Image (tube, helix red, strand yellow):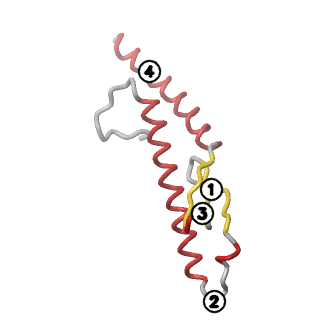
Amino acid sequence: MKNLGQMMKQAQQMQAKMADMQAKLGDMEIGGAAAGGMVAVTLNGRGEMRKVKIDRSLVDPEDVEVLEDLIVAAYNDAKGKVEATMQEEMAKLTGGLGLPPGFKLPF
C-alpha cells in the first residue's frame, strides 16, 4: 500500500505541475511567418491566434486567394512551433516518470 500512496502523491504533484505549465503556455507568444515574413501570425501556447500582420504590398483586391493562402501558411508555421514547444515542456514535466514511448499526457 505504501507504493500506491506514493503514486497518488506523484499524480497530485504532476497535476499541479501540468496546471502551471498550461498557464505558462497561455501567456507565451509564438510567431509564424510566410512569404519571407510579409505575413506573420502570433499564437499563444494554446494555439489561439493573437495577432496577424500583413505587409501592405500583399493587399491586392484582385488576388485575395494568395493572401488567404499566406495567412494559412503563417498560421500553420506558428502552430507547428506551438506544438514543438508544448512537447518540450511536457518532456521537462514528465522526464522523471519513465513513461513508455508514445504515452501522451494529458489523457
Between circles 4 and 2, the one closer to the viewer is: 2
Label 2 neighbourhood size at 10 Å, few (<14), some (14-19), many (20+)? few
For label 2, the residue is 62
Horizontal arrangement in the rendering, residue 68 relative to residue 50 (left or right): left
Residue on which disc 3 sits: 37
Front in this rendered view, residue 50 or 16: 50
Which of the image's four quarters has the N terminus?
top left
Residue at horizontal 37%, vertical 40%? 104
Name the front one of labels 4 and 3: 3
Q: Earlier in the sequence, mark 2 or mark 1?
A: 1
**Marks 4/2: CA distance?**
59 Å
Earlier along the polypeptide chain: callout 3 or callout 2?
A: 3
**Gap in Å between the C-alphas at discs 3 and 2?**
22 Å
Give the labeled residue for mark 4.
Answer: 10
Give the residue type at disc 4.
Gln
Mark 3 touching mark 1, by CB under 8 A? no
In the displayed orientation, state which residue is furthest to the left: 100
Q: Earlier in the sequence, mark 4 or mark 3?
A: 4
* Element at label 4: helix
Decide which of tag 4 and tag 1 comes sooner along the chain: 4
Instruction: Check disc 1 and report the residue beneath it.
Output: 42
**Mark carried by residue 105:** none
Residue at x 52% of width, y 49% of height: 82
Assess disc 3: are there few (<14), some (14-19) or many (≥20) residues with their C-alpha within 10 Å of its C-alpha: few
The amino acid pointed to by label 1 is: Thr
First in sequence: mark 4 vs mark 2: 4
Q: Are marks 2 and 1 in contact (CB under 8 Å)?
A: no
Tell me the crowding category of disc 1: few under 14, some 14 to 19, or many 20 or more residues within 10 angstroms, Cα based.
many
Q: At x 68% / y 70%, what residue is drawn?
A: 55
> Do the residues bearing badges 4 and 1 touch, measured as CB atoms within 8 Å?
no
